[in-house]
Protein backbone atom coordinates (compact mmCIF):
# COMPACT_ATOMS: atom_id res chain seq x y z
CA UNK A 1 0.00 0.00 0.00
CA UNK A 2 1.52 3.30 -1.16
CA UNK A 3 1.22 6.36 1.07
CA UNK A 4 2.54 9.63 -0.35
CA UNK A 5 1.40 11.78 2.59
CA UNK A 6 2.12 11.42 6.31
CA UNK A 7 -0.64 9.80 8.36
CA UNK A 8 -2.84 11.70 10.75
CA UNK A 9 -5.09 9.38 12.72
CA UNK A 10 -7.74 11.05 14.89
CA UNK A 11 -10.56 9.43 16.84
CA UNK A 12 -13.66 10.29 18.80
CA UNK A 13 -14.83 8.04 21.61
CA UNK A 14 -17.07 5.32 20.28
CA UNK A 15 -20.50 6.19 21.57
CA UNK A 16 -22.64 4.03 23.79
CA UNK A 17 -25.90 2.99 22.14
CA UNK A 18 -28.19 2.94 25.16
CA UNK A 19 -29.57 6.29 23.94
CA UNK A 20 -29.58 8.40 20.78
CA UNK A 21 -26.76 10.91 20.18
CA UNK A 22 -27.01 14.13 22.18
CA UNK A 23 -25.40 17.57 22.25
CA UNK A 24 -22.30 16.31 24.07
CA UNK A 25 -21.85 13.46 21.62
CA UNK A 26 -22.03 15.89 18.73
CA UNK A 27 -19.60 18.23 20.52
CA UNK A 28 -16.83 15.62 20.56
CA UNK A 29 -17.52 14.62 16.98
CA UNK A 30 -17.50 18.12 15.50
CA UNK A 31 -14.34 18.89 17.46
CA UNK A 32 -12.56 15.93 15.87
CA UNK A 33 -14.00 16.76 12.46
CA UNK A 34 -12.61 20.30 12.53
CA UNK A 35 -9.16 18.94 13.31
CA UNK A 36 -9.45 16.26 10.62
CA UNK A 37 -10.36 18.87 8.01
CA UNK A 38 -7.51 21.13 9.12
CA UNK A 39 -5.01 18.29 8.87
CA UNK A 40 -6.25 17.32 5.39
CA UNK A 41 -5.67 20.95 4.40
CA UNK A 42 -2.11 20.50 5.68
CA UNK A 43 -1.42 17.65 3.25
CA UNK A 44 -1.89 14.80 5.73
CA UNK A 45 -3.38 11.42 4.88
CA UNK A 46 -6.14 11.59 7.48
CA UNK A 47 -8.03 8.72 9.00
CA UNK A 48 -10.89 10.05 11.11
CA UNK A 49 -12.64 7.34 13.11
CA UNK A 50 -15.90 7.37 15.02
CA UNK A 51 -18.40 4.65 15.80
CA UNK A 52 -20.58 2.84 18.31
CA UNK A 53 -19.80 0.96 21.52
CA UNK A 54 -22.35 -1.87 21.44
CA UNK A 55 -21.50 -4.37 24.17
CA UNK A 56 -22.11 -4.46 27.88
CA UNK A 57 -24.87 -4.91 30.37
CA UNK A 58 -26.49 -1.52 29.77
CA UNK A 59 -26.99 -2.25 26.09
CA UNK A 60 -28.59 -5.61 26.81
CA UNK A 61 -30.90 -3.90 29.33
CA UNK A 62 -31.79 -1.13 26.84
CA UNK A 63 -32.69 -3.72 24.21
CA UNK A 64 -34.99 -5.54 26.62
CA UNK A 65 -36.53 -2.33 27.94
CA UNK A 66 -37.32 -1.16 24.40
CA UNK A 67 -38.89 -4.46 23.37
CA UNK A 68 -36.15 -5.75 21.03
CA UNK A 69 -35.63 -9.47 20.76
CA UNK A 70 -31.84 -9.17 20.97
CA UNK A 71 -29.13 -6.62 21.87
CA UNK A 72 -27.89 -6.86 18.27
CA UNK A 73 -31.28 -5.82 16.91
CA UNK A 74 -31.29 -2.84 19.27
CA UNK A 75 -27.79 -1.81 18.16
CA UNK A 76 -28.78 -2.12 14.50
CA UNK A 77 -31.72 0.20 15.15
CA UNK A 78 -29.41 2.82 16.71
CA UNK A 79 -26.86 2.99 13.92
CA UNK A 80 -28.95 5.25 11.62
CA UNK A 81 -29.49 7.72 14.46
CA UNK A 82 -25.74 8.30 14.70
CA UNK A 83 -24.96 8.13 11.00
CA UNK A 84 -27.81 10.49 10.11
CA UNK A 85 -26.77 13.13 12.64
CA UNK A 86 -23.15 12.97 11.50
CA UNK A 87 -24.28 13.39 7.90
CA UNK A 88 -26.45 16.37 8.89
CA UNK A 89 -23.52 17.98 10.74
CA UNK A 90 -21.24 17.43 7.73
CA UNK A 91 -18.91 15.11 9.64
CA UNK A 92 -16.13 13.85 7.37
CA UNK A 93 -15.25 10.60 9.16
CA UNK A 94 -13.39 8.06 7.04
CA UNK A 95 -14.55 5.08 9.07
CA UNK A 96 -17.43 4.10 11.34
CA UNK A 97 -16.65 1.16 13.58
CA UNK A 98 -19.12 -0.98 15.49
CA UNK A 99 -17.83 -3.22 18.25
CA UNK A 100 -20.08 -6.02 17.01
CA UNK A 101 -18.18 -6.15 13.70
CA UNK A 102 -16.00 -9.19 12.98
CA UNK A 103 -12.92 -7.00 12.47
CA UNK A 104 -13.27 -5.67 16.00
CA UNK A 105 -13.87 -9.09 17.56
CA UNK A 106 -10.68 -10.33 15.89
CA UNK A 107 -8.73 -7.36 17.23
CA UNK A 108 -9.97 -7.76 20.79
CA UNK A 109 -9.32 -11.49 20.89
CA UNK A 110 -5.81 -11.05 19.49
CA UNK A 111 -5.09 -8.35 22.08
CA UNK A 112 -6.33 -10.51 24.96
CA UNK A 113 -4.21 -13.43 23.75
CA UNK A 114 -1.15 -11.17 23.64
CA UNK A 115 -1.81 -10.02 27.21
CA UNK A 116 -2.05 -13.66 28.33
CA UNK A 117 1.07 -14.71 26.45
CA UNK A 118 3.04 -11.82 27.93
CA UNK A 119 1.87 -12.66 31.46
CA UNK A 120 -0.15 -9.53 32.16
CA UNK A 121 -3.54 -11.11 32.89
CA UNK A 122 -4.58 -13.75 35.40
CA UNK A 123 -7.79 -15.30 36.74
CA UNK A 124 -9.02 -14.58 40.24
CA UNK A 125 -12.19 -13.64 42.10
CA UNK A 126 -13.47 -10.06 42.12
CA UNK A 127 -15.09 -8.68 45.24
CA UNK A 128 -15.68 -4.96 45.07
CA UNK A 129 -17.74 -1.96 44.08
CA UNK A 130 -19.35 -1.66 40.68
CA UNK A 131 -21.37 1.14 39.06
CA UNK A 132 -23.96 -0.54 36.88
CA UNK A 133 -25.04 2.63 34.94
CA UNK A 134 -21.41 3.47 34.05
CA UNK A 135 -20.24 -0.16 33.97
CA UNK A 136 -17.18 0.87 35.95
CA UNK A 137 -15.30 -0.72 38.83
CA UNK A 138 -14.06 1.32 41.79
CA UNK A 139 -11.58 0.53 44.54
CA UNK A 140 -12.30 0.95 48.23
CA UNK A 141 -9.91 3.90 48.24
CA UNK A 142 -11.73 5.68 45.41
CA UNK A 143 -15.09 5.16 47.09
CA UNK A 144 -13.78 6.36 50.45
CA UNK A 145 -12.18 9.49 48.95
CA UNK A 146 -15.40 10.36 47.16
CA UNK A 147 -17.38 10.04 50.40
CA UNK A 148 -14.85 12.27 52.17
CA UNK A 149 -15.20 14.90 49.42
CA UNK A 150 -18.99 14.79 49.70
CA UNK A 151 -18.88 15.27 53.47
CA UNK A 152 -16.39 18.13 53.10
CA UNK A 153 -18.99 19.87 50.92
CA UNK A 154 -21.61 19.41 53.64
CA UNK A 155 -23.54 16.64 51.90
CA UNK A 156 -25.33 13.90 53.78
CA UNK A 157 -23.46 10.65 54.35
CA UNK A 158 -24.20 7.91 51.85
CA UNK A 159 -25.57 4.52 52.85
CA UNK A 160 -22.48 2.41 53.64
CA UNK A 161 -24.24 -0.58 52.08
CA UNK A 162 -24.62 1.36 48.84
CA UNK A 163 -21.96 4.10 48.65
CA UNK A 164 -22.14 6.51 45.73
CA UNK A 165 -20.26 6.32 42.46
CA UNK A 166 -17.30 8.76 42.30
CA UNK A 167 -18.25 9.59 38.70
CA UNK A 168 -22.04 9.82 38.60
CA UNK A 169 -23.15 9.80 42.29
CA UNK A 170 -25.52 6.89 41.79
CA UNK A 171 -25.49 3.95 44.24
CA UNK A 172 -22.77 1.35 43.76
CA UNK A 173 -23.31 -2.39 44.02
CA UNK A 174 -21.09 -4.93 45.72
CA UNK A 175 -20.38 -7.72 43.27
CA UNK A 176 -18.52 -11.00 43.63
CA UNK A 177 -17.61 -13.05 40.59
CA UNK A 178 -14.75 -14.90 38.94
CA UNK A 179 -12.82 -12.58 36.68
CA UNK A 180 -9.72 -12.12 34.58
CA UNK A 181 -7.51 -9.34 35.92
CA UNK A 182 -5.07 -7.05 34.16
CA UNK A 183 -1.88 -6.26 36.08
CA UNK A 184 -2.47 -2.51 36.05
CA UNK A 185 -0.46 -2.15 39.26
CA UNK A 186 2.69 -3.11 37.36
CA UNK A 187 2.44 0.05 35.27
CA UNK A 188 2.26 2.72 37.94
CA UNK A 189 5.89 3.83 37.56
CA UNK A 190 6.11 3.22 33.80
CA UNK A 191 3.08 5.47 33.34
CA UNK A 192 4.55 8.22 35.54
CA UNK A 193 7.82 7.99 33.60
CA UNK A 194 5.93 8.22 30.34
CA UNK A 195 3.94 11.28 31.45
CA UNK A 196 7.18 12.98 32.46
CA UNK A 197 8.92 12.24 29.16
CA UNK A 198 5.82 13.11 27.12
CA UNK A 199 4.41 16.25 28.79
CA UNK A 200 2.02 16.88 25.88
CA UNK A 201 0.43 13.43 26.01
CA UNK A 202 -2.55 14.66 28.08
CA UNK A 203 -4.01 18.04 27.23
CA UNK A 204 -4.97 20.49 28.60
CA UNK A 205 -2.57 20.80 31.54
CA UNK A 206 -5.35 20.66 34.16
CA UNK A 207 -6.33 17.18 32.95
CA UNK A 208 -2.71 16.05 32.98
CA UNK A 209 -2.42 17.08 36.63
CA UNK A 210 -5.62 15.18 37.41
CA UNK A 211 -4.22 11.99 35.89
CA UNK A 212 -0.86 12.37 37.61
CA UNK A 213 -2.59 12.71 40.96
CA UNK A 214 -4.70 9.63 40.30
CA UNK A 215 -1.76 7.42 39.31
CA UNK A 216 0.43 8.65 42.17
CA UNK A 217 -2.38 7.59 44.50
CA UNK A 218 -1.67 3.98 43.56
CA UNK A 219 -3.00 1.59 40.92
CA UNK A 220 -4.67 -1.73 41.61
CA UNK A 221 -5.13 -4.62 39.20
CA UNK A 222 -8.22 -4.26 37.04
CA UNK A 223 -11.02 -6.73 36.43
CA UNK A 224 -11.33 -7.02 32.64
CA UNK A 225 -13.97 -9.74 32.20
CA UNK A 226 -17.53 -10.54 33.13
CA UNK A 227 -19.07 -13.98 33.50
CA UNK A 228 -22.60 -13.11 34.68
CA UNK A 229 -23.86 -12.13 31.22
CA UNK A 230 -22.79 -12.97 27.68
CA UNK A 231 -23.36 -9.82 25.59
CA UNK A 232 -19.74 -9.16 24.77
CA UNK A 233 -16.63 -10.56 23.08
CA UNK A 234 -15.59 -13.96 24.40
CA UNK A 235 -12.10 -14.52 25.69
CA UNK A 236 -10.45 -16.78 23.08
CA UNK A 237 -8.95 -18.97 25.82
CA UNK A 238 -11.91 -18.90 28.25
CA UNK A 239 -15.32 -18.71 26.48
CA UNK A 240 -17.23 -18.39 29.80
CA UNK A 241 -15.87 -14.86 30.08
CA UNK A 242 -16.59 -11.82 27.93
CA UNK A 243 -14.38 -8.75 27.79
CA UNK A 244 -15.19 -5.90 30.16
CA UNK A 245 -16.91 -3.35 27.95
CA UNK A 246 -14.31 -0.64 28.49
CA UNK A 247 -11.38 -2.86 27.51
CA UNK A 248 -13.37 -4.02 24.48
CA UNK A 249 -14.14 -0.39 23.55
CA UNK A 250 -10.57 0.93 23.81
CA UNK A 251 -9.23 -1.67 21.41
CA UNK A 252 -11.44 -0.27 18.63
CA UNK A 253 -8.71 2.27 17.91
CA UNK A 254 -6.47 -0.62 16.88
CA UNK A 255 -8.99 -2.92 15.22
CA UNK A 256 -10.11 -0.03 12.97
CA UNK A 257 -6.63 0.13 11.42
CA UNK A 258 -6.25 -3.59 10.80
CA UNK A 259 -5.03 -4.98 14.12
CA UNK A 260 -6.22 -8.58 14.37
CA UNK A 261 -6.71 -9.02 10.62
CA UNK A 262 -4.63 -11.45 8.60
CA UNK A 263 -2.33 -10.56 5.74
CA UNK A 264 0.36 -8.09 4.76
CA UNK A 265 -2.07 -5.33 3.79
CA UNK A 266 -3.50 -5.23 7.32
CA UNK A 267 -0.02 -5.29 8.83
CA UNK A 268 1.03 -2.40 6.59
CA UNK A 269 -2.03 -0.40 7.59
CA UNK A 270 -1.31 -0.86 11.29
CA UNK A 271 2.29 0.17 10.73
CA UNK A 272 1.22 3.28 8.80
CA UNK A 273 -1.62 4.40 11.07
CA UNK A 274 -0.49 3.45 14.57
CA UNK A 275 0.14 5.17 16.88
CA UNK A 276 -2.78 7.57 16.58
CA UNK A 277 -1.99 11.26 16.62
CA UNK A 278 -4.88 12.18 18.93
CA UNK A 279 -7.84 10.71 20.78
CA UNK A 280 -10.56 13.31 21.45
CA UNK A 281 -12.44 12.36 24.65
CA UNK A 282 -14.67 13.85 27.34
CA UNK A 283 -13.42 14.33 30.88
CA UNK A 284 -15.67 11.54 32.18
CA UNK A 285 -13.55 8.89 30.41
CA UNK A 286 -10.14 10.33 31.13
CA UNK A 287 -8.95 7.44 33.33
CA UNK A 288 -9.77 4.88 30.65
CA UNK A 289 -7.85 6.76 27.96
CA UNK A 290 -4.98 8.21 29.95
CA UNK A 291 -4.30 5.42 32.47
CA UNK A 292 -5.81 2.08 31.45
CA UNK A 293 -5.33 2.39 27.68
CA UNK A 294 -1.64 3.37 27.77
CA UNK A 295 -0.99 0.62 30.34
CA UNK A 296 -2.69 -1.95 28.12
CA UNK A 297 -0.61 -0.81 25.16
CA UNK A 298 2.58 -1.02 27.21
CA UNK A 299 1.63 -4.55 28.25
CA UNK A 300 1.05 -5.52 24.59
CA UNK A 301 4.37 -3.87 23.60
CA UNK A 302 2.63 -1.41 21.29
CA UNK A 303 3.34 2.33 20.84
CA UNK A 304 1.18 4.79 22.73
CA UNK A 305 -0.92 7.47 21.00
CA UNK A 306 0.74 10.84 20.69
CA UNK A 307 -1.93 12.83 22.48
CA UNK A 308 -5.24 12.64 24.31
CA UNK A 309 -7.22 15.87 24.18
CA UNK A 310 -9.78 16.01 26.99
CA UNK A 311 -12.72 18.38 26.75
CA UNK A 312 -15.16 19.36 29.46
CA UNK A 313 -18.93 19.08 29.65
CA UNK A 314 -21.47 21.39 28.07
CA UNK A 315 -23.63 23.12 30.65
CA UNK A 316 -26.56 25.51 30.20
CA UNK A 317 -26.37 29.16 31.19
CA UNK A 318 -29.55 30.14 33.01
CA UNK A 319 -30.61 33.27 31.13
CA UNK A 320 -32.29 34.73 34.23
CA UNK A 321 -29.71 34.00 36.95
CA UNK A 322 -26.57 33.65 34.83
CA UNK A 323 -25.69 30.42 36.65
CA UNK A 324 -24.27 27.46 34.75
CA UNK A 325 -26.50 24.41 35.22
CA UNK A 326 -26.08 20.77 34.34
CA UNK A 327 -28.14 19.89 31.29
CA UNK A 328 -30.94 17.45 32.11
CA UNK A 329 -34.48 16.59 31.12
CA UNK A 330 -35.66 16.89 34.72
CA UNK A 331 -34.49 20.53 34.85
CA UNK A 332 -36.22 21.20 31.56
CA UNK A 333 -33.05 22.68 30.09
CA UNK A 334 -31.87 19.82 27.87
CA UNK A 335 -31.05 20.92 24.33
CA UNK A 336 -31.06 18.54 21.37
CA UNK A 337 -28.68 19.06 18.42
CA UNK A 338 -31.64 19.29 16.06
CA UNK A 339 -33.02 22.29 17.96
CA UNK A 340 -29.78 24.24 17.56
CA UNK A 341 -29.49 23.29 13.89
CA UNK A 342 -33.03 24.58 13.35
CA UNK A 343 -32.06 27.96 14.82
CA UNK A 344 -28.55 28.44 13.43
CA UNK A 345 -28.15 26.12 10.47
CA UNK A 346 -25.40 23.51 10.30
CA UNK A 347 -22.34 25.68 9.66
CA UNK A 348 -23.24 28.26 12.29
CA UNK A 349 -23.92 25.39 14.74
CA UNK A 350 -20.39 24.11 14.11
CA UNK A 351 -18.94 27.60 14.43
CA UNK A 352 -20.66 28.38 17.73
CA UNK A 353 -19.70 25.17 19.51
CA UNK A 354 -16.14 25.21 18.23
CA UNK A 355 -15.32 28.91 18.39
CA UNK A 356 -17.26 30.26 21.36
CA UNK A 357 -17.00 27.32 23.76
CA UNK A 358 -13.86 26.74 25.86
CA UNK A 359 -12.87 23.14 25.12
CA UNK A 360 -10.66 22.29 28.07
CA UNK A 361 -13.18 23.10 30.79
CA UNK A 362 -16.92 22.81 31.37
CA UNK A 363 -18.55 25.39 29.15
CA UNK A 364 -21.96 27.04 29.53
CA UNK A 365 -24.09 27.58 26.43
CA UNK A 366 -27.27 29.59 25.98
CA UNK A 367 -29.73 30.50 23.28
CA UNK A 368 -29.00 34.16 23.84
CA UNK A 369 -25.27 33.68 23.35
CA UNK A 370 -25.85 31.60 20.22
CA UNK A 371 -27.82 34.45 18.66
CA UNK A 372 -25.24 36.99 19.75
CA UNK A 373 -22.30 35.10 18.23
CA UNK A 374 -24.24 34.30 15.07
CA UNK A 375 -25.21 37.92 14.46
CA UNK A 376 -21.88 39.50 15.46
CA UNK A 377 -19.36 37.11 13.91
CA UNK A 378 -21.29 35.60 11.02
CA UNK A 379 -24.12 37.86 9.88
CA UNK A 380 -22.60 41.29 10.57
CA UNK A 381 -18.94 40.49 9.93
CA UNK A 382 -18.22 37.53 7.64
CA UNK A 383 -21.51 37.39 5.76
CA UNK A 384 -21.66 41.16 5.42
CA UNK A 385 -18.12 41.35 4.01
CA UNK A 386 -18.83 38.70 1.40
CA UNK A 387 -22.14 40.25 0.37
CA UNK A 388 -20.97 43.85 0.02
CA UNK A 389 -17.66 42.98 -1.62
CA UNK A 390 -19.15 40.66 -4.24
CA UNK A 391 -21.90 43.18 -4.87
CA UNK A 392 -19.37 45.96 -5.55
CA UNK A 393 -17.22 43.72 -7.72
CA UNK A 394 -20.19 42.79 -9.85
CA UNK A 395 -21.43 46.37 -10.01
CA UNK A 396 -18.15 48.08 -10.86
CA UNK A 397 -16.45 45.39 -12.98
CA UNK A 398 -19.20 44.01 -15.20
CA UNK A 399 -20.07 41.06 -12.97
CA UNK A 400 -16.46 39.88 -12.56
CA UNK A 401 -13.64 40.12 -10.07
CA UNK A 402 -11.03 42.67 -11.14
CA UNK A 403 -7.94 41.08 -12.63
CA UNK A 404 -5.08 40.83 -10.15
CA UNK A 405 -3.43 44.26 -10.35
CA UNK A 406 0.23 44.56 -11.25
CA UNK A 407 0.78 46.35 -7.94
CA UNK A 408 -1.08 43.73 -5.85
CA UNK A 409 1.92 43.42 -3.52
CA UNK A 410 1.63 47.08 -2.64
CA UNK A 411 1.37 47.56 1.13
CA UNK A 412 -2.22 47.89 2.24
CA UNK A 413 -3.92 47.36 5.61
CA UNK A 414 -5.36 44.07 4.33
CA UNK A 415 -2.09 42.69 3.01
CA UNK A 416 -0.52 43.59 6.33
CA UNK A 417 -3.39 41.94 8.27
CA UNK A 418 -2.88 38.71 6.31
CA UNK A 419 0.88 38.52 6.88
CA UNK A 420 1.59 35.53 9.14
CA UNK A 421 -2.08 34.59 9.32
CA UNK A 422 -1.42 30.94 8.50
CA UNK A 423 1.25 30.53 11.18
CA UNK A 424 -0.89 32.15 13.88
CA UNK A 425 -3.97 30.20 12.87
CA UNK A 426 -2.16 26.86 12.55
CA UNK A 427 -0.55 27.20 15.98
CA UNK A 428 -4.02 27.62 17.51
CA UNK A 429 -5.52 24.77 15.52
CA UNK A 430 -2.78 22.31 16.47
CA UNK A 431 -3.43 23.15 20.14
CA UNK A 432 -7.22 22.68 19.72
CA UNK A 433 -7.57 26.38 20.49
CA UNK A 434 -10.34 26.78 17.96
CA UNK A 435 -11.53 30.02 19.49
CA UNK A 436 -8.07 31.52 19.03
CA UNK A 437 -7.91 30.32 15.43
CA UNK A 438 -11.35 31.77 14.65
CA UNK A 439 -10.38 35.09 16.23
CA UNK A 440 -7.38 35.30 13.91
CA UNK A 441 -9.69 34.96 10.90
CA UNK A 442 -12.30 37.30 12.33
CA UNK A 443 -9.62 39.95 12.88
CA UNK A 444 -8.80 39.89 9.15
CA UNK A 445 -12.50 39.94 8.24
CA UNK A 446 -13.06 42.92 10.56
CA UNK A 447 -10.06 44.70 9.05
CA UNK A 448 -11.61 44.22 5.62
CA UNK A 449 -14.95 45.66 6.76
CA UNK A 450 -13.13 48.70 8.15
CA UNK A 451 -11.15 48.95 4.92
CA UNK A 452 -14.40 49.26 2.97
CA UNK A 453 -15.44 52.24 5.08
CA UNK A 454 -12.00 53.85 4.94
CA UNK A 455 -11.52 53.47 1.18
CA UNK A 456 -15.14 54.23 0.18
CA UNK A 457 -15.03 52.36 -3.16
CA UNK A 458 -18.42 53.87 -4.10
CA UNK A 459 -16.69 57.28 -4.15
CA UNK A 460 -13.73 55.94 -6.14
CA UNK A 461 -16.15 54.50 -8.70
CA UNK A 462 -17.40 57.99 -9.50
CA UNK A 463 -13.95 59.13 -10.72
CA UNK A 464 -12.78 57.40 -13.93
CA UNK A 465 -9.21 58.55 -13.28
CA UNK A 466 -9.16 56.41 -10.11
CA UNK A 467 -10.21 53.18 -11.83
CA UNK A 468 -6.91 51.46 -11.03
CA UNK A 469 -7.21 52.44 -7.39
CA UNK A 470 -10.76 51.07 -7.30
CA UNK A 471 -9.60 47.80 -8.87
CA UNK A 472 -6.90 47.41 -6.22
CA UNK A 473 -9.37 48.07 -3.40
CA UNK A 474 -11.94 45.55 -4.65
CA UNK A 475 -9.27 42.97 -5.46
CA UNK A 476 -7.86 43.36 -1.91
CA UNK A 477 -11.30 42.67 -0.47
CA UNK A 478 -11.86 39.60 -2.62
CA UNK A 479 -8.40 38.30 -1.79
CA UNK A 480 -9.19 38.52 1.93
CA UNK A 481 -12.45 36.67 1.29
CA UNK A 482 -10.58 33.96 -0.60
CA UNK A 483 -8.07 33.47 2.22
CA UNK A 484 -10.74 33.62 4.95
CA UNK A 485 -12.84 31.02 3.13
CA UNK A 486 -9.91 28.60 3.31
CA UNK A 487 -9.32 29.27 7.01
CA UNK A 488 -13.01 29.01 7.88
CA UNK A 489 -13.42 25.77 5.90
CA UNK A 490 -12.70 23.35 8.80
CA UNK A 491 -15.41 25.08 10.84
CA UNK A 492 -17.93 25.93 8.11
CA UNK A 493 -17.20 23.69 5.13
CA UNK A 494 -20.46 24.27 3.25
CA UNK A 495 -20.41 28.06 3.52
CA UNK A 496 -16.74 28.20 2.57
CA UNK A 497 -17.42 26.09 -0.51
CA UNK A 498 -20.30 28.40 -1.43
CA UNK A 499 -18.10 31.49 -1.05
CA UNK A 500 -15.50 29.98 -3.35
CA UNK A 501 -18.22 29.10 -5.85
CA UNK A 502 -19.37 32.72 -5.88
CA UNK A 503 -15.78 33.71 -6.63
CA UNK A 504 -15.57 31.15 -9.46
CA UNK A 505 -12.92 29.23 -7.48
CA UNK A 506 -12.75 25.44 -6.94
CA UNK A 507 -15.21 24.54 -4.21
CA UNK A 508 -13.16 21.79 -2.59
CA UNK A 509 -10.92 22.75 0.31
CA UNK A 510 -7.21 23.12 -0.32
CA UNK A 511 -4.65 20.43 0.51
CA UNK A 512 -1.93 23.06 1.00
CA UNK A 513 -3.32 25.62 3.39
CA UNK A 514 -0.03 27.45 3.94
CA UNK A 515 0.26 28.09 0.21
CA UNK A 516 -3.43 29.02 -0.09
CA UNK A 517 -2.94 31.73 2.54
CA UNK A 518 -0.18 33.45 0.59
CA UNK A 519 -1.14 36.91 -0.59
CA UNK A 520 -1.82 37.13 -4.32
CA UNK A 521 -3.60 33.87 -5.02
CA UNK A 522 -6.68 35.41 -6.64
CA UNK A 523 -6.10 35.77 -10.40
CA UNK A 524 -9.42 37.56 -10.89
CA UNK A 525 -11.19 38.20 -14.13
CA UNK A 526 -13.80 35.51 -13.45
CA UNK A 527 -17.52 36.04 -12.83
CA UNK A 528 -18.64 36.72 -9.26
CA UNK A 529 -22.05 36.29 -7.70
CA UNK A 530 -23.45 38.18 -4.72
CA UNK A 531 -26.12 35.56 -4.01
CA UNK A 532 -28.42 35.40 -1.01
CA UNK A 533 -27.12 36.37 2.44
CA UNK A 534 -24.94 33.61 3.85
CA UNK A 535 -26.18 34.29 7.37
CA UNK A 536 -29.52 36.14 7.55
CA UNK A 537 -29.69 38.05 10.81
CA UNK A 538 -31.51 36.39 13.69
CA UNK A 539 -34.10 38.44 15.51
CA UNK A 540 -35.67 37.58 18.85
Image: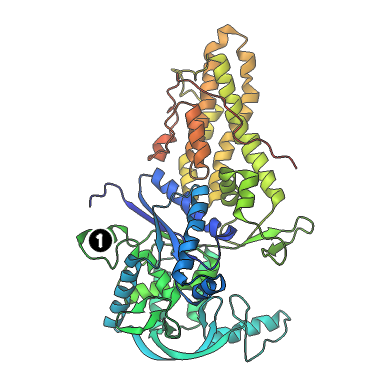
> Considering only vertical position in the picture, is 176 above or below 137?
below
Q: Is residue 65 left or right of residue 326?
A: left
Spot occupied by residue 223 in the image (x, y as percentages of width and height): 43, 84
Q: Residue, x 24% and y 62% (percent of image)?
A: 267
> Considering only vertical position in the picture, is 130 above or below 484?
below
Here the colouring is: rainbow
Residue 309, can we see it?
Answer: no
Spot occupied by residue 326 in the image (x, y as percentages of width and height): 67, 65
How crowded pointer 1 is (Cα within 10 Å; few <14, some 14-19, many 20+) is rated as some
Spot occupied by residue 56 in the image (x, y as percentages of width and height): 47, 75
Front residue (pair 478, 158): 158
Find the residue positioned furthest to the top.
464
- The image quadrant that residue 538 belongs to is top right
Q: Is residue 378 left or right of residue 416?
A: right
Find the residue positioned furthest to the left.
264
| Number of dots carrying numbers | 1
Q: Quadrant of the C terminus?
A: top right
Front residue (pair 6, 204): 6
- State the residue position of label 1: 266
Q: Secondary structure at mark 1?
A: helix
- The image quadrant that residue 105 belongs to is bottom left
Spot occupied by residue 422 in the image (x, y as percentages of width and height): 46, 40
Q: Residue, x 41% and y 64% (percent of image)?
A: 98
Amino acid sequence: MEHSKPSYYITTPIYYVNAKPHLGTAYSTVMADVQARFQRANAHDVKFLTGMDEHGEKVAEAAEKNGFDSPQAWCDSMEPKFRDLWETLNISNDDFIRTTQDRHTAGVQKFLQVLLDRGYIYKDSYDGWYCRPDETYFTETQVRHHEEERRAKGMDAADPEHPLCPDCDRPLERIQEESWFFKLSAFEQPLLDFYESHPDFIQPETRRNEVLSFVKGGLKDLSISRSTFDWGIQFPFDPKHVAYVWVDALINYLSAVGYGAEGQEAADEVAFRWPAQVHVVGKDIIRFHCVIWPALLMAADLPLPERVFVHGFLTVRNEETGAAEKMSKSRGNAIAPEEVIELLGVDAYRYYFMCDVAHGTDAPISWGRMRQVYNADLANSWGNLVSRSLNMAGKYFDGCAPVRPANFEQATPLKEACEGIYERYAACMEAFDYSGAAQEVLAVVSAANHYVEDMAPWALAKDPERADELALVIWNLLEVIRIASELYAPFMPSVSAEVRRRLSLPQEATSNLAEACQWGGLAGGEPVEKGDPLFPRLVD
